[in-house]
Image (spheres, grey):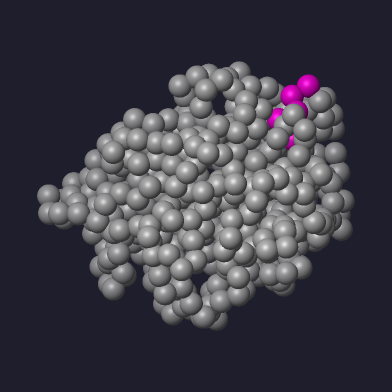
Amino acid sequence: MDRRRFLGSLAAAAGGLMLSPRLLRADSAIDAFARSRAAHPYLAGWQSIDGEAFGPSKVALEGRLPEGLAGTLYRNGPALFERGGQRYSHWFDGDGLVHAWKITPRGVEHRARMVSTSKYQREDKAGRFVLPAAGSRVEAAVAVRNNDDVNVANTAVTVIDGRLFALWEAGSAYELHPDTLVTLGPVTWAQGMESAPFSAHPLREVDGSLWNFGSLDVLGGSGLLIWRIGADGQLLKHQLLPTPAPGYLHAFAMTQKHLLFVLTPYRMGDSGPFFERLKFAPDLPCRIAVVPKDALDAPRWFEADFGMAYHFGDAFERDGVIELRAVLHEDSAEAVSPMAAAMRGEHEPIVEGEGARLSSLCIDLAAGHARWVDQGLRGLEFPQFDPRSAGDRGAMLYAPLTVGARDVPYANAVAAIDAERGTRTVHHYGARVLAEEHVFVPRPGSDRANAGWLLGTVLDSDRDRTGLAVLDAERIENGPLATVWLQRSFPLGFHGHFNPG
Ligand SMILES: [Fe+2]
């Protein structure tokens, strides 16, 4: 794998930082954030974490946990934004904090712990940020040897055969102890594949095996690495998929037969951290690889108009057309640095009717073309669905959403969206509650699609506390069956995984 360009640019970024006037303001960035948080309590979602391990603590329960719901919701997100007088400016840069919400018939227990990556350990020792970051300028950053030197393991979690992994976009998965959350170390799936990127959005087959990818484009190389991991956690296969042009992708989708990779075109600027140099190119088409699961070296490539999605919902195939649901971001600046104002501690004015929109990418296999079809819904992100949904029609999507009057520039509700019928049901948490991803948990013993619960974390900014809500997925409008509240707030996270049992 050729990482020279990526590493070279990180080094260049580090070198160029010495004289940056931003450095002179570094101390005040922390002060400014603290002042603004006092005035705008919702900024707790972007606070820097103040410890390494939290809990285990029993959590107060409101309502009643549904019978049959037992297991652990793991979640991950960037949490350490400040060290040695510096504050990161980009949300994606914070070191990962993994939460475990353990649900038993006796109640709910919470714990959380920083992922002890090599980056975290080095910077903990140094007492300051010393490694280049993906989106923030870091003062006097040192040179890096490979992408795992800057791995923050902060994006998602998954469990394979009882083993827990913290995931990032451009480096190794980090294995954690599933009970204590203590970091065990980075994972190499096969000899010679050290530090190969293993993205944060693996997809699971019914048999428990996983597909994943790693993008070499963003590391200065070219192509996509496709991973196939067995239900036992062993590598079954990996395949390099050459890409026709540089494309960014954060996640992917699949039907019963195909893997679907949507590459967003970009051009790279010359200097600065990765997300400063990344310029999406709306004048260029998306390139889409449709890869048969049984012939990874035989992709079909399609083109569609430009579109930028971090996250995809379900995909299905009907009458020779693949339909894939995506959350498209139209604002390029927001897309490369989401919630940038909140990271700076600035209150962002609320603009109604804005936000990412739900769109379907329709890929006509016979005609050989692909096009985006708007689904008429805005202001959502982090879509989830029941993996038991039928493979020949759209699944119900579950997603945080912005609705009604709101005081904070973030999702305040959760919705069940039937895009094919154009209907949705919503639970509105409140004007000053921030709603995160809601993970769908199938009801044990039922094969019926959408029978189950949504487990969603929320930040109640009025009371400065983080909670976990449990909703009946088929009766979202009734609100949570049960909610548990911690005694404090934590920074918002990105993605979770529920491990039953
Ligand atoms: Fe993601």
Q: Residue at x 73, y 49 (%)?
A: 61
Quadrant containing the C terminus in the rendered view: bottom right
> Percent from the top left, x then y, of residue 30?
81, 33
In this rendering, the answer to whether 498 lies above or below 28 is: below
> Percent from the top left, x then y, of residue 90?
65, 39
Residue 40 on the magenta segment:
yes
Residue 253 can be seen in this image = no
Q: Quadrant of residue 485?
A: top right
Which of these two is toward me, 156 or 472?
472
In this rendering, the answer to whether 335 lies above or below 490 is: above
Q: Residue at x 85, y 39 (%)?
A: 85
> Percent from the top left, x then y, of residue 192?
54, 78
Which of these two is toward me, 425 or 51?
425
Q: Residue at x 33, y 40 (%)?
A: 419
Q: Residue at x 52, y 53 (%)?
A: 453
Residue 54 can be seen in this image = yes
Residue span colored magenta: 39-44
> Percent from the top left, x then y, of residue 113?
76, 58
Indicate left or right for 149 with 36 as reference.
left
Which of these two is toward me, 88 or 138?
88
Which of these two is toward me, 468 or 33?
468
In this rendering, the answer to whether 80 lies above or below 260 is: above
Which secondary structure dominates the residues rendered in magenta? helix
Indicate left or right for 294 with 44 as reference.
left
